[in-house]
Amino acid sequence: MTNPTVHHVSASRGRVRAAYTLMCPENLVENALPHLTGVNAMPLATPRSLPARFGEYLLEFEPGGRSTRPLGAGFENFLYVLDGEAHIGADTHTATLTPGGFAFFPEGVEFSIETPGASRVLWVKRRYERVAGVADPEVVIGHVDDVTHHPDDTIGGTYAPLLPLDERYDMAMNFMRFEVGSRFQMVEVHHQEHGLYMTEGEGVYYLGDDHVEVSAGDFIYMAPYCPQSFYATGSTRPSYLLYKDINRDGF
Ligand code: UGY
Ligand code: MN
């Protein structure tokens, strides 16, 4: 006698804990946002994933998907193209971003986006924390292959800040790449929070009291003070794009 094929639906790598959330591609649910047409806009982190103070979305564009009016009012906004091609415009800036291309728009600079073909884009937004005596940040447009990748022994790989790290900026977007078989040399515990999107490869993430297997397409929200370290597994170099709040103390 043969068993019929059964698809169990109560087991998943996705999980929600006090100090972190793991969302895997199979966990994501279609979602719409205003002024985006032909776009599946899936939240990965929002202030609903307490205590997150930023939003991160995976935007899946159909061919011709686009914004129908300028987006991002009241926030600073960061876009990173995972695949396909995206035309963006803001103020006097226009650019066509290919995979690895990114754009940052400070608060007050709204943006439009359109993709000729199917495309996937990460969108990070947060309220800017202005500080008296500190100038506002500026628009940044670039590509991950054109920025400096700094060796970092404490993580066993390289980190590449996509945005300037000076005090005008209250958010960092760092591209981190790891050697095969490497691991962090410490367990980090810090007051900043993270939004981590795995772009390539696989590994084991230590988060609080848990070890979780992660791979390309996974997203981890890490709350402030979440203990964290990473072991690279698999036969290719893993990498991830990491949001981190910087240069402010969170009061
Ligand atoms: O910069 C960082 O906090 C980074 N090393 N953390 C991480 O990758 N989990
Ligand atoms: Mn960290």
Image (tube, rainbow, N blue to C red):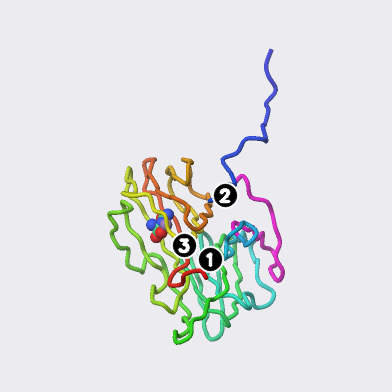
Q: Which residue is mark 2?
A: 18
| Farthest-out residue, front | 251
In the image, is the residue at mark 1 within 8 Å of ligand 1 by its beta carbon? no
* Magenta run includes residue 27: yes
From this viewpoint, is residue 118 visible?
A: no
Residue type pointed to by label 1 = Glu
Q: Is residue 174 magenta?
A: no
- The answer as to whether callout 3 falls within 8 Å of ligand 1 is yes
Residue 119, image x, y percentages: 57, 61
Q: Seen in the image, is 228 located left or right of residue 42?
A: left
Q: Of circles 2 and 1, which is in front? A: 2
- Asked if ligand 2 lies within 8 A of label 2, the reply is no
Give the answer, above or below, for where 87 lies relative to 233: below
**Type of the residue with mark 3:** Gln
Q: Which residues are magenta?
A: 23-45
Name the mark on residue 192. Answer: 3
Mark 1 and mark 3: Cα distance apart in space: 32 Å
Residue 116 vs residue 94, the one in the foreground: 94
Q: Residues within 10 Å of mark 3 (few under 14, many from 20)?
A: some
Quarter occupied by residue 59:
bottom right
- At 67% across and 31% down in the image, what residue appears? 7
Rendering coords of residue 242 (x, y %): 46, 60
Q: Choose the circle earlier in sequence order: 2 or 1.
A: 2
Residue 61 % position (x, y) = 63, 62
* Tag 3 secondary structure: loop
Q: Which residue is mark 1?
A: 85
Q: Is residue 169 left or right of residue 20?
A: left
